[in-house]
Amino acid sequence: MSAAGNSNEVRRPDALALAHIWVAFGLFAVATLLGLYQLLERDQLVRTSAAGYYGSMTLHGVIQAFVLTTFFILGFGYFVTATSLRRPIRWPRLAWLGFATMLAGSVIAALSIVSGRATVLYTFYPPMIAHWSFYAGAALLLVGSIPWIAITIAMTLRWKRENPGRAIPLPQFGMTSCAILWAWTMVGVVIEVVFQLLPASLGLAQTIDVGLARALFAWTLHPIVYFWLIPAYVALYSIVPKAAGGYLFSDEMGRVVFVMLLVFSLPVGLHHVFVDPQQAAGWKLMHAFGTFLVALPTLLTGFTVAASLETAGRLRGGRGLFGWIRALPWSEPVALGGILALLLLLPGGFGGLINASYAMDTMVHNTMWMPAHFHLIFGGAVVIVYFASAYALFPKLTGRRLYSRGMAAAQIWLWFIGILALTVPWHIVGLLWMPRRTAYSPYDPQIVARWRPYTAAMIAGGVLLVVSGVMLLVNLLLTHRNRQAEPDRSMAYADAVEPVVTVPALLNGFATWNWLLVVLMAISWAYPIGQFFFIQTVKLVRGGDAARGQKLHKDCADCHGVAGNVETPDVPDMGGQDPLYIYKQLSDYKTNSRASSIMNEAAKDLSDREMADLAAFYAAQRPARSSGKAPVSNGAAVKLATVGDGVRLIPACDACHGDRGAGNPGFYGMPALKDQKSQDLTVQLMAFRSGERANDVYRVMRDLCKHLTDSEIGALASYYSGAPPEQPPAISATRPPEKK
């Protein structure tokens, strides 16, 4: 399919595309330097404050994941639309207004981060809240992209009306699928920002439903990856085969892939919240299967692009089974970028399957495995194609020859080597349980020593990436100022091996697929999101009346003290405890889901309202504080609490219970362990291990505790209580412990 438009045939959006791409790569340079800084800081080669680390991490992540991608994709998209349809961009003033809005939003968000008012990358995950200006800036970035969505879809529909029966050019078909996907992708995070985060950050809302917020962000978090990926696929299908001197193996296969990416990527996302108790296991399982389906278009793309490259290699004289590989134009930067991206795409996709698997994801989700996977698939496969696309587009956009093709090829090779040097050891330290999202690693020296060789290799990879990024910017800047004119500014896309004139209607439009997508999204998200509105347990507990609870507590005070805290060693302290946890335990006692003759009798006549009032009373009390002197940290306890044990499939305790067990408001009903009594903690862990206590959600505690030894249980109880370790008490194999 050839759409070779002469630069004079249509009024092309060259300045518009260049403005977007220069902003993208200019900020990309800043983010790349910040990435290297984080590697050096985590290895303690440079010193800074925790706030400085989190600020740099936030700015790095926001630029790379949101600003670089959105600006580059829109600039690339405007150019592809104009040149593949051979039409001028509709509503150019609206497009420029969108650009200005995005730029303003990026500056506002960046200033909020730099000033220290939004220093946690995942500020879309309350209860961590940024300054309102961060959310306002992010909202402007999203709003500024809407004109591109409207222009892309409108131009496709207009072209179809003017060319009845003809196949939409494949590059535009891909970019239209990207625009539709982006329109749907934004919905989740827009609802979260407008109705939850902005009101909370402005002080207009005193509480926020973190479960709802995480579900809404999960709506956006998965498909946004394919918003980044689809333009790379457009280049792999339409630009790389041409640059390699060959043909696209199958136009129809490309259309199938773009439809699959649209339909499969949006109705999934709960694999990002596998351990969140707010979502039921059945829905998580359904989303996991949906995530596996997204692997299909990746595999089809790997096959189709490889077949296209083989065609190019054989046309260039390659013979034998693998001779075509040697015959490929390895010095041609655009073709080289596609080849190397393909090599990174397949292992990156395999890592995605691991992340979509419940048991395996639970083991690696809070480790360095996750950013390693992200950087391999995005920073590797996707960004390399962005580089290759820039080398293909810049001579067409500027009218100047590419300054140095040799430098361009060297830059792409260096980025490829650097990303492998960075991400391979990064995956390994993830498997060695190095935690993510932390400024420091204050763990057992033996644990840290195991990471050192790999973190050193990561730093070397980071240095290579910085050098490669500088080479990219220098080459593009010198191209922009090159005095040698580009002789042919027309843009030609790859022809298919078998020329395509018409295609089935389902592969030449999106109306049917869009309606199917609406149905699938309703099935996948109606309950996971709707439950927060029609299931009233959380609202009931949050509306508990502490004053009424205090009156009800009079019947409990003999065992639990005046404020829910007593010295009795096997009775838990409830002052300051999570109210949802208390409510659940009372409910479980009432229904005999948790066994205790005393508590079963005490709770049997409590109403839901009374249990909520009691929970509110206990949560409002001052937490008990350990009177014992904190012992020297036990290495086994510290490892289990902060890192876990991957060999025995034990995730870090603090991942759910918060730092040092101080509580985790982001997890509904997750109890605080800090300063609870050592004997009570020991009894409960032993009961979970034996199965005598069985009211844990999804068997999480039973499955973990069955791997713990007596000494480890005692060490953990000592660690969280701050009291000297005790000998674990013997617990009957048949009779649950009496708990009050």
Image (cartoon, rainbow, N blue to C red):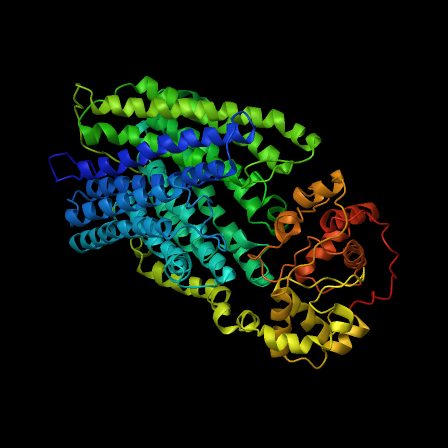
Residue at 50% from the left image edge and 64% from the top image edge: 528
Residue at 37% from the left image edge and 26% from the top image edge: 469
In the picture as drawn, the residue positioned furthest to the bottom comes out as 605
102 left or right, relative to 519: left
Q: Position of residue 183 (x, y in %)?
A: 33, 55
In the picture as drawn, the residue positioned furthest to the left comes out as 8
Exactly how many numbered labels are in the figure? 0
Q: Which is nearer the eye, 578 or 221?
A: 578
628 left or right, relative to 324: right
Residue 564, by quadrant, is: bottom right
Q: Position of residue 295 (x, y in %)?
A: 49, 46
Q: Which is nearer the eye, 311 or 91?
A: 91
Q: Is residue 320 visible?
A: no
190 left or right, relative to 363: left
394 w.r.t. 629: above or below: above
Q: Quadrant of the C terminus?
A: bottom right
Q: Position of residue 484 (x, y in %)?
A: 17, 18
Q: Is residue 518 visible?
A: yes
Residue 306, by quadrant, is: top left
133 w.r.t. 382: above or below: below
Residue 387, by quadrant, is: top left
Residue at 42% from the left image edge and 53% from the top image edge: 220
327 w.r.t. 559: above or below: above
Q: Which is nearer the eye, 580 or 558?
A: 558
Q: Which is nearer the eye, 327 or 346?
A: 346
Q: Position of residue 721 (x, y in %)?
A: 74, 51
Q: Quadrant of the N terminus?
A: top left
403 w.r.t. 564: above or below: above
